[in-house]
Image (spheres, helix red, strand yellow):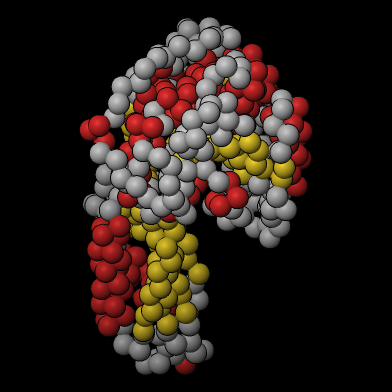
């Protein structure tokens, strides 16, 4: 599969699929449609005859079942085609650095862009690998074209090897993940999978099954504007009230600058300021949804306290839900993660579970009724000119997909018949996987 993954990856990164949060069209940029249509054509070419793109740019296709075991659940694999709006994504020139031996990787179009072993711990795990970078002025687009290539190569392999038993496998490629709209037009019912996996992770062997719970909070201070020359005793400057509020936010804790691991934070990130009215938008993050509520209560109390100290000022707060920790859903479906671990072991890698200090499309899908952990693809330094991917790890990701399809079939009856709605399986009872044989290609 390595050749197929690599050929595809090199082809896909040449498409400019940068998404644009200011755009009102769906998908947000026309380049994404070009790649999505290309993927429809390629899926059909390898035999997925139902491949099609929805009016909103979601591509779906089916690999028909090869098993007769009717209790094998339908599983799905997803990746996003867009690249980050933060960095140029046109005219990407991928460069292969063969047999990486720890040397500095200097990107030719900007000699100041250098990947150094000492600064990139993940490179140490890829000694001997073939590393792909961009040329120094653009991102590479491995986020998430590595995922797209891995899924396509696995689909091609499964279609060419009908002797591998698996249930119905659904594939989807989505636009606009980077601007938070990847699932806005995703039809979970039409997808029809019981479980799914996003291929959008980094380090070899990693499964991400835990994300932040996230809200956005808007704190709006109302002041009173009048001509400042005649403002004595009357003018109330909402900008100063908001500044007072921001100054009182915790500095040595609960901030992105001072937290990692399981610690959440509050983070002012946008301010819309005028004397009459100033609003501050804050990200609120915690791995526990309860913890989110505590942080919001803290912000609310702080904002009201500040408004009270400024005579004539008032404050309103509003909370908008962003996404929830997918673990709340995945804990109800231990098979989704356990089977992924088994498949990763079958590919000769020790699986690691990891938390995401952010969200994924999988987090949103999990709460839309489709439990969706995130799997590794070998991509690193996403949204950067120093983005890179290991060819060997990308190929391993494709191999894991094939194993996963087999594992779900082999374990089908052990996990009970497929039925609608959440069902619980004790995680201690995970049956051992019978065989890890897969022809290498
Ligand atoms: Zn991504």
Q: How many marks?
A: 0
Quadrant of the frame with the N terminus:
top right
Please, is residue 127 above or below residue 251 in the view?
A: above
Query: At which x and y percent is residue 381?
Result: 49, 31
Task: Kindly identify the residue that appears in the image at 72 percent across and 27 percent down.
Answer: 47
Task: Kindly identify the residue that appears in the image at 40 percent across and 40 percent down.
Answer: 417
Horizontal relation, residue 358 to residue 81: left or right = left
Query: At which x and y percent is residue 184?
Result: 57, 56
Closest to the observer, 161 or 367: 161
Please, is residue 225 above or below residue 262 in the view?
A: below
Quadrant of the frame with the C terminus:
top right
Which quadrant of the view contains residue 415? top left
Task: Kindly identify the residue that appears in the image at 47 percent across and 24 percent down.
Answer: 406
Horizontal relation, residue 60 to residue 217: left or right = right
Query: At which x and y percent is residue 282?
Result: 40, 62
Please, is residue 271 above or below residue 103 in the view?
A: below
Task: Kindly identify the residue that appears in the image at 72 percent across and 53 percent down.
Answer: 55
Closest to the observer, 82 or 274: 82
Report whether residue 6 is seen: no
Query: At which x and y percent is residue 407?
Result: 43, 25
Report whether residue 47 is seen: yes
Closest to the observer, 44 or 15: 44
Which quadrant of the view contains residue 355? top left
């Amino acid at each position: 599969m390595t050749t197929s993954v690599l050929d595809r990856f090199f082809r896909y990164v040449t498409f400019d699929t940068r998404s644009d949060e200011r755009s009102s069209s769906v998908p947000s940029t026309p380049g994404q449609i070009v790649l999505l249509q290309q993927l429809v054509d390629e899926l059909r070419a390898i035999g997925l005859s139902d491949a099609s793109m929805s009016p909103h740019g979601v591509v779906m296709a089916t690999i028909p079942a090869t098993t007769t075991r009717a209790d094998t659940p339908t599983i799905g694999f997803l990746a996003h085609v867009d690249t980050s709006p933060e960095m140029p994504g046109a005219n990407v020139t991928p460069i292969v650095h063969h047999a990486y031996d720890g040397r500095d990787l200097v990107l030719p179009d900007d000699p100041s862009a250098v990947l150094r072993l000492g600064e990139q711990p993940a490179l140490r795990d890829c000694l001997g690998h073939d590393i792909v970078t961009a040329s120094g002025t653009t991102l590479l687009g491995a986020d998430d074209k590595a995922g797209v290539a891995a899924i396509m190569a696995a689909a091609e392999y499964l279609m060419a090897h009908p002797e591998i038993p698996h249930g119905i496998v659904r594939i989807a490629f989505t636009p606009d993940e980077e601007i938070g709209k990847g699932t806005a037009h995703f039809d979970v019912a039409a997808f029809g999978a019981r479980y799914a996996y996003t291929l959008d992770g980094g380090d070899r062997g990693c499964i991400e099954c835990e994300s932040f719970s996230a809200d956005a909070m808007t704190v709006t201070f109302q002041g009173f504007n009048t001509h400042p020359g005649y403002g004595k005793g009357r003018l109330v400057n909402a900008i100063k009230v908001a500044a007072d509020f921001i100054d009182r936010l915790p500095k040595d804790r609960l901030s992105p600058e001072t937290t990692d691991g399981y610690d959440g934070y509050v983070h002012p990130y946008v301010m819309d300021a005028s004397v009459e009215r100033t609003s501050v938008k804050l990200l609120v993050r915690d791995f526990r949804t309860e913890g989110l509520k505590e942080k919001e209560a803290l912000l609310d109390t702080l904002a009201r306290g500040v408004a009270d100290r400024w005579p004539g000022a008032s404050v309103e707060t509003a909370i908008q839900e962003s996404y929830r920790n997918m673990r709340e859903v995945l804990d109800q479906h231990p098979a989704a993660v356990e089977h992924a671990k088994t498949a990763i072991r079958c590919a000769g890698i020790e699986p690691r579970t990891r938390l995401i200090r952010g969200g994924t499309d999988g987090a949103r899908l999990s709460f839309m009724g489709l439990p969706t952990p995130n799997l590794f693809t070998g991509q690193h330094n996403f949204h950067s000119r120093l983005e890179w991917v290991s060819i060997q790890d990308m190929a391993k990701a494709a191999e894991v997909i094939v194993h996963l399809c087999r594992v779900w079939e082999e374990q089908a009856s052990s996990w009970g018949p497929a039925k609608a709605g959440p069902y619980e399986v004790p995680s201690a009872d995970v049956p051992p996987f019978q065989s890890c044989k897969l022809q290498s290609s």
